[in-house]
Amino acid sequence: MSEKKYFVYKKGDNKEIIYMDYDKLKGFGFMPKNNVKYDGIIVNKMVIIKPSMIEKVLKRKIRKKLDLYLKLIINFLDDDDSSSPGALSETLNDLSRYKNIVLYKYRKYLDEKYFKILLKKIELLEYELNYKLMNINMNLYDLYEEEKTSNRTR
């Protein structure tokens, strides 16, 4: 199958075909999900070059991910008995991995003010997860110590 590359460009009605070197383009690349079934072009990779469009796409993507983490934290806080340290530590590891992605991949595309606010939000989520994990570990340790001392009595 031959590889075809397309460039979508809208500026007037001049109907010109523009060829570009895709390897030299500096932009934000991602792979769309292609969830909609239709008889057209299936997009495997997309590179956005316009800075304002990159910022809009990233802000939307970041907002969705932060909402997901916030919902997870709310579920952990609501379910005091059922939350396990393993699930909390896995969520914390995933959040720290996402923080590294934001630091090293998204930083160059985002406004500095928005970036600082975003890092504060992520650090707050990390703090809440660490606090909850520490409380669960302390409760488990207290139960262990209580069981240990109760077995020694005659």
Image (spheres, rainbow, N blue to C red):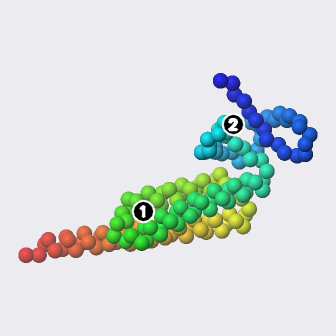
Quarter of the C terminus within the rendering:
bottom left
Structural crowding at the residue carrying mark 2, measured as other residues with C-alpha within 10 Å and reported as few (<14), some (14–19) or many (≥20): few
The residue indicated by pointer 2 is 40
Residue 75 visible in rendering: yes
Q: Residue furthest top?
A: 1
Circles 1, 2 touching at the beta carbon (< 8 Å): no
Quadrant in the picture for the N terminus: top right
Q: Position of residue 46 (x, y in %)?
A: 70, 43
Which of the two residues, 146 or 84, is positioned nearer the viewer here? Answer: 84
Give the percent coordinates (x, y) of residue 64.
59, 60
Q: Is residue 65 above or below residue 138?
A: above
Along the polypeptide, which appears first: circle 1 or circle 2? Answer: 2
Which of pointers 1 and 2 indicates the residue nearer the eye?
2
The residue drawn where x is 72% and y is 67% is: 113
Q: Which residue is mark 1?
A: 88
Q: The residue tagged with tag 1: helix, strand or loop?
A: helix
Q: Is 15 in front, or is 69? A: 15
Looking at the rendered structure, the kind of residue marked 1 is: Leu
Residue 82's place in the image compared with 43, above or below, is below
Can you name the residue that lies furthest to the left here? 154
Assess disc 1: are there few (<14), some (14-19) or many (≥20) residues with their C-alpha within 10 Å of its C-alpha. some
**Which residue is drawn at the image coordinates 26% and 72% (left, top)?**
143
| Left or right of 95, for residue 18 | right
Amino acid carrying label 2: it is Gly
Q: Position of residue 146 (x, y in %)?
A: 22, 74
Q: Is residue 32 left or right of residue 96?
A: right
Residue depicted at x 36% and y 69%? 136
Q: Quadrant of residue 18?
A: top right
Q: Which mark is residue 151?
A: none
| Residue 9 picture quarter | top right
